[in-house]
Image (cartoon, rainbow, N blue to C red):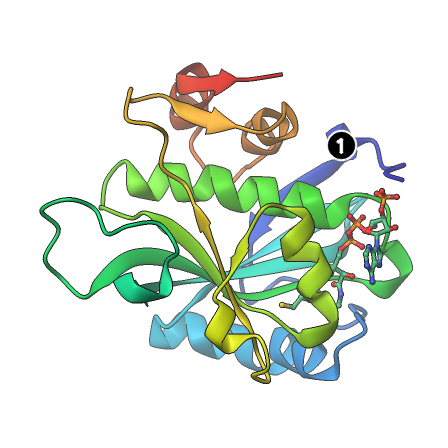
Amino acid sequence: MADILYGGLSIRRLNHRSRVSSFCCKEDDLNDFIKNDALIAHSNMTSRTYLCYLNGIVVGFATLAAATIEVKSVEEPPIEGYTPKTYPCIKLARFAVDKNYEGKGIGPYLLRWVMGKFYQISDEIGCRYITVDSKKRSMWFYEKHDFTLVEKTRNKLHPVFYLDMCDEGDGTIPIPDPLLKMAIISDQSIPWRTRVIIVMNLRLDT
Ligand SMILES: CC(C)(COP(=O)(O)OP(=O)(O)OC[C@H]1O[C@@H](n2cnc3c(N)ncnc32)[C@H](O)[C@@H]1OP(=O)(O)O)[C@@H](O)C(=O)NCCC(=O)NCCS
């Protein structure tokens, strides 16, 4: 059950002053990545990492990269008239919550923030899905948040999930809950004017 006051969370982009040394999640490779590789990936422009803070402590992070997913990996029929063999995506390349802060709703919060970032990017550059190469023991998390498993990858080391971010086509954005609105408002990496525009364009279904 979430017991974190979402107003206390904020997101900032990783930089060379970020203090990540105390971060510790259950997956060693993710701890290694955030401490040793994430900044190098920034320099190489292969991914961008965003840190989630609670009272000045890094409690989670999300790493994003451009990616594609094969049209034939998606369950829905191909988009009419779309000829490329892949769809453009944003990939959740790394995603973790500190083990001392698990089960408090930080993962869902960070995921909503990723959705907000997706809409910001997809407004400028065509982009349809969020994808993730899941860890086996985190599959429940993506299932719980309505991602679809690419069935042929089920038994792979990193099963692939995707989330279709497109609405029925009326130009508004389908949002599962108001948490996303909160995540966007608190995102200090987005200029406040942009935040206002994104939030005004959301259609909250709840
Ligand atoms: C997966 C992860 C991001 C989830 O983050 P989180 O902030 O703990 O997420 P939540 O707060 O929603 O988790 C708690 C909820 O999940 C449920 N849950 C926990 N483990 C579960 C499991 N194995 N199966 C189903 N539900 C589970 C809890 O019961 C709780 O549900 P509730 O909100 O209804 O009470 C976090 O556990 C993590 O960082 N794991 C290690 C790194 C990792 O695997 N990252 C993903 C790599 S692809």
* Quarter of the image where the N terminus is located: top right
Q: Amino acid at mark 1?
A: Tyr
Observer able to see residue 165:
yes
How many numbered discs sit on the rendered protein? 1
Quick check: 111 left or right of 23?
Answer: left
**Residue nearest the viewer, comparing 185 with 125:** 125
Among the 4 quarters of the image, the one containing residue 96: bottom right
79 up-or-down from 23: above or below: above
* Quarter of the image where the C terminus is located: top right
59 up-or-down from 196: above or below: below
Asked if the beta carbon under badge 1 is closer than 8 A to the nearest atom of ligand 1, the reply is no
Q: Residue at point 56% right, 74% down? A: 159
Residue 29 x %, y %: 67, 83
Disc 1 on helix, strand or loop?
Answer: helix
| Residue for badge 1 | 6
**Residue nearest the viewer, comparing 3 with 168:** 168
Quick check: 181 left or right of 25?
Answer: left
**Residue nearest the viewer, comparing 50 with 86:** 86
Observer able to see residue 70:
no
Quick check: 6 left or right of 180?
Answer: right
89 up-or-down from 134: above or below: above
Residue 65 x %, y %: 40, 64
Residue 24 x %, y %: 81, 71
Q: Residue at point 57% right, 75% down? A: 154
Quadrant containing ligand 1: bottom right
Q: Residue at point 45% right, 36% down? A: 190
Q: Residue at point 54% right, 17% down? A: 204
For mark 1, does the 10 Å Cα neighbourhood hold few (<14), some (14 to 19), or many (20 or more) residues? some
Residue 171 x %, y %: 29, 22
